[in-house]
Amino acid sequence: MSKLRLAVIGCGDIASFTALVSRLVPQVSLSACCDVNAERAQGFARRHGIKQVFTDYADLLERAAVDAVYLAVPHHLHYPMVLQAAGAQKAVFVEKPITRTLPEGLALVEKIGTARIGVNYQYRYDSACYALARAVQAGALGKIHSMRINIPWRRTQAYFDGAPWHKTIAQAGGGTLITQGSHFLDLALWALGEPPVSAMGYTATPTFAVEVDTLAHGIVETRSGTLINISSSMAAAVEQAVTIEAYGERGTAFYRNLPLPSVKWIGVKVRRESPPERGVHALQRSMAGFADWILHDKPFLTPAVSTLPVLAAVDGIYQSAVTGARIYIDRSLNLQP
Ligand SMILES: NC(=O)c1ccc[n+]([C@@H]2O[C@H](COP(=O)([O-])OP(=O)(O)OC[C@H]3O[C@@H](n4cnc5c(N)ncnc54)[C@H](O)[C@@H]3O)[C@@H](O)[C@H]2O)c1
């Protein structure tokens, strides 16, 4: 196999971006697409030169000539669709989060066994996030005692009205924390290389008449005692830069995603590492990484099992927000980011 024949399932918001950057990945061929909304599927196929178009996922799995599927569908569909695709012997690249809840994620990873399932936490492939994570992993900042993540993002009512599944816990699993915050919490856990062991949190729903959180604050403790403090919002008046600060015994790393991803080192000199794939955007590098994993067995940064720790941390913050208690995460799960 020299090219990965990929089917895009769910031709909505993120799929449009992913399809554009995937066209820059030479080892990927966009070969089929599927959406329950036939007009959307047809329009997507036209824009990306795709000939095999479906409105039924099972039909696509049975008839399309593809090696892998990219699932960009609402969160509650991740679990059944990953299982179905794995059962049809397809490699799967599923959008984050792996599933809507931790029990679903744990059950899924157990059921898929050795099947190749990747999750699109593309910030692990962001050039500056990658440099920060590798510096932390290499011990360049010394032991990290604290990380602080701030995501002051803005969504409009149209975001919820255009895709109403985002409004409900039953379909989305939660709001800003699981949908946006989990990207950067995943990055922090991966950088630290440690599972979360406890979490506390508060959630609120300013600005929008929806069931899910549009503001979430949480503290996650990792196995060696690092405290990660996260604030994730969809309700900022103006969208501002995401920042990640990592405070170590020898120095600090400071990440900003705007105007371009950058990382500054304070108190230490660090030899900056580049992500293992080339490309103009993290989404492109993440897709290239997935394709190289399937085609050439090159290590991929976000295999399914490595994204369970962030789901456990999100689950802990949500449970704490409801109960008011500190939530202890089951250590026997052996979660490894
Ligand atoms: N990686 C990122 O940066 C990023 C950014 C945004 C969204 N996402 C993730 O992408 C996924 C999709 O989010 P979105 O914002 O694009 O949602 P969306 O609502 O814009 O798109 C989802 C699409 O799935 C289609 N769909 C629903 N049920 C289907 C089915 N049974 N078969 C085929 N198609 C079906 C819908 O018609 C819709 O077109 C979510 O997991 C979300 O968290 C990731």
Image: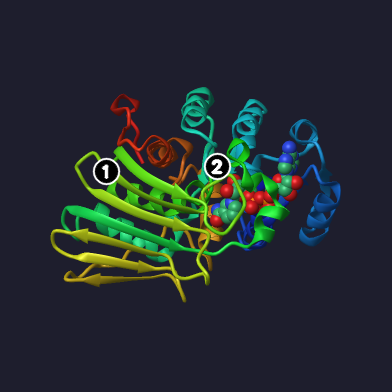
Left of 195 or right of it: where is 114?
right
The percent position of residue 65, horizontal first and vertical second, equals 76, 39
**Amino acid type, label 2:** Ile
The percent position of residue 149, horizontal first and vertical second, equals 36, 58
The percent position of residue 233, horizontal first and vertical second, equals 48, 58
Per the image, label 2 sits on a secondary structure element best described as helix
Q: Nearer the viewer, residue 78 or 70?
A: 78
Whether residues under marks 2 and 1 lie with C-beta atoms below 8 angstroms apart, the answer is no
Per the image, label 1 sits on a secondary structure element best described as strand
Quarter-of-image position of residue 56? top right
Kindly give the residue lying farthest to the bottom in the view shown: 259
Quick check: can you spot residue 176?
Answer: yes
The percent position of residue 129, horizontal first and vertical second, equals 38, 61
Residue 86 to residue 128: above or below: above
Does label 2 or label 1 sit earlier along the sequence? 1
Q: Nearer the viewer, residue 229 or 52?
A: 229
- Disc 1 residue crowd, few under 14, some 14–19, many 20+, Cα 10 Å: many
Q: Nearer the viewer, residue 40 or 137?
A: 40
Residue 307 to residue 245: above or below: above
Quadrant of the image containing the C terminus: top left
**Amino acid type, label 1:** Glu
Q: Which residue is at a point 23% across and 39% down the rendered structure image?
A: 223
* Mark sitting on residue 221: 1
Quarter-of-image position of residue 261? bottom left
Quick check: can you spot residue 28?
Answer: no
Q: CA separation, marks 2 and 1?
A: 34 Å
The residue to which callout 2 is attached is: 294
Q: Which residue is at a point 82% across and 41% down the rendered structure image?
A: 55
Left of 38 or right of it: where is 331?
left
**Foreground: disc 2 or disc 1:** 1
